[in-house]
Image: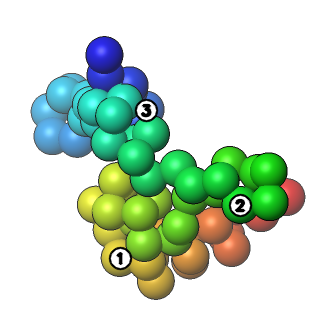
Amino acid sequence: MKKRTGETRGEGQESLIPAERIERAILLSRGQKVMLNRDSAQLYGVTTGRLNEHVRRNQG
């Protein structure tokens, strides 16, 4: 089973990431599901610095 990222790449083609890849990146810390910045950045194909920029820009 694959999950859609919602991000479009190329000419109208949606990028699909296998659910297993996402599930492997999710960790359990003190009862909370978390994902490390480096794993999130890797899934989106960007650097951790770029990911952090976007997170700061899109906060509340």
Q: Are marks 2 and 1 in contact (CB under 8 Å)?
A: no
Q: Which label lies toward us, 2 or 1?
A: 2
- Residue 8 visible here: no
Label 1 belongs to which residue? 47
Which quadrant of the figure contains the C terminus? bottom right
Q: Say which amino acid is labelled 2.
A: Ser
43 or 8: which is nearer to us?
43
Q: Mark 2 points at which residue?
A: 29
* Residue 45 position (above or below residue 33): below
Q: Nearer the viewer, residue 13 or 48?
A: 48
Comparing 41 with 6, the one in front is 41
- The residue type indicated by label 1 comes to Thr
> What residue lies at 65% left-to-right and 53% top-to-bottom?
28
Q: Where is residue 23 in the image (x, y as percent from the top left)?
A: 44, 39
Left or right position of 55 against 14: right
From the viewer's perspective, is the residue at label 3 or at label 2 nearer?
2
Q: Distance between the residues labelled 3 and 2?
A: 27 Å
Q: Residue at x 71, y 61 (%)?
A: 29
- Label 2 neighbour load within 10 Å: few <14, some 14-19, many 20+: few
